[in-house]
Image: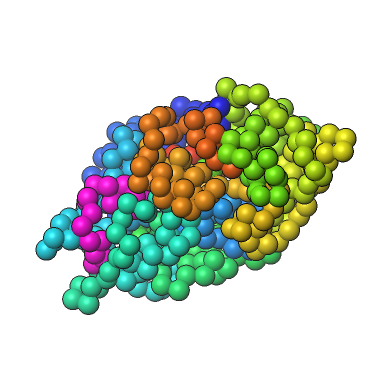
Amino acid sequence: MSDEAPSPPAQGRREQGCRELGRRALLSGAAALSALLATDPAAALGRVPTGGTLRMRMAWSTRRLDPHDLFDPLAALFGTAIADPVYQLDYQGKPYPTLADGMPRVQDGQTVVHLRPGMRTAKGKALGGRDLAWSVSRARQQGAAGLLAPLPRYVRSSKDDPLIARFGKTDPLKLAVLLASPLVSLLPVGFSATSPDGSGPFRARCSASSLELTRNRNAARGPSFLERVIVRSAPDLAASLRAFESGQDDVGWLGLGLHRNRARARKFNYGRVGWVVLATGRQAGRYAAPGVAQQLANAVPAERLHLGLSPRRGLGAGTPWRGDPATLLYDSSSGHLKTIAEAVAVKLSEPGHEVTPTPVSRARLRRARVTNDFALALDVVRHPAAGPTGALIALSTADRKSLGKDVALHPPRGNYGRPGHQLTTTLRLGVLGGLAVRGGVIKQVLLAAARRGGGLDLGASYRSP
């Protein structure tokens, strides 16, 4: 089983390469300009336009955005718009510095990361080694518990040099790969998910109705081309398609329209940024055994139900729910999960063995998952994009933090990039499908793909006048 979505089309990849370099050219001068022209000679014909607003809506809550949260779908989609990791991986999987002043190096027996001087967040807070040490500690407590297991437990800042963070005795290359994950993005000390702040191309404002991104003039790697991006929270999947079809929005999430395709719009497909999973808890009885959750997920033909999930391949046999009547918990603030929960309940239920979709608060869902006190639950797990074992570690951590740590320290053999039966037979969660980044966009907007992995690079996207 694989939930891999198709790679971006050739045109999308060319746009992505051009736009990614274009934003960085603000910082790297003639060398970046030469690379830009070599990537796409057509770029020499004119400048990339700046300004303009991009509007879209999607059926996710916009109340909070936390780049360190493994279960935050908004961060999976827009986390890189507000915060950067200190390293990134190139197309060969090799790390290179972004916010760091060079690769990690050994000093006095310890591996040290030097940050670039003069960096500030969107709200004007100076960024230094103390913020990096705090970010790594916070990420370890949040979604990167498994991913960061190979690192020493404590990361120290330095009184002598405010731009340094010390990581103890750690392999420098392995450290750079781990620090390239968006789950370990550099955040200022005291970061708040409801009032997020970071060094990315945009400044964010979260509310119950929308996520508003505005150009960050302090962006460490250069501000966005767009002046503003407005992401409205929609009650269901159809709302985005209706708004796009009628001309209210510039992006139609997951399609080109509800009843008919919008004229002169084009499709985009930039892979997936995580997974929607079905988890089983102790109230599920014998269905709580490892591997059974994936069998339940296989009984739901997500590819044919228009649930906005990227397709799976090579599925094993599915198993309907034949336990006692059970509730299927999901985040009440997510219209997308509501649609999926209703479809899953119908496909799993049998007379006398009904599954009832049950909306609960995000906090209650988290408590149920931590205590394992539930029967069935829907959740989102982000892809950490940190080396070949990242997907394996993320899904294992989503099941149990202790398991994620064990997998990170002792990874089994196999194809880690395609989470399938080899992995899910050991877990109490099954993959229903990938969290897809696809849909339709008007011809005036060029969306850039993320430099590595799935998703969008909104900072490198632009709108023609």
Q: Residue at x 41, y 69 (%)?
A: 188
The magenta segment: 164-183
Q: Residue at x 66, y 50 (%)?
A: 282
Q: Residue at x 11, y 63 (%)?
A: 108
Q: Is residue 302 among what the camera can see? A: no
Q: How many numbered circles are shown?
A: 0
Residue 323 in the figure: left or right of residue 132: right
Furthest residue in direction right, as rendered: 351
Pick whichever, 345 or 409, lies toward us. 409
State which quadrant residue 442 falls in.
top right
Find residue 370 and report its horizontal and vertical position in percent.
Answer: 59, 58
Furthest residue in direction bottom, as rendered: 159
Find residue 131 and report its horizontal and vertical position in percent.
Answer: 35, 69
Residue 229 in the figure: left or right of residue 106: right
State the quadrant of the N terminus. Answer: top right
Residue 46 to residue 24: above or below? above
Find residue 414 and report its horizontal and vertical position in percent.
Answer: 40, 29
Furthest residue in direction front, as rendered: 286
Residue 315 to residue 48: above or below? above
- Asked whether 396 falls inside the magenta stretch, the response is no
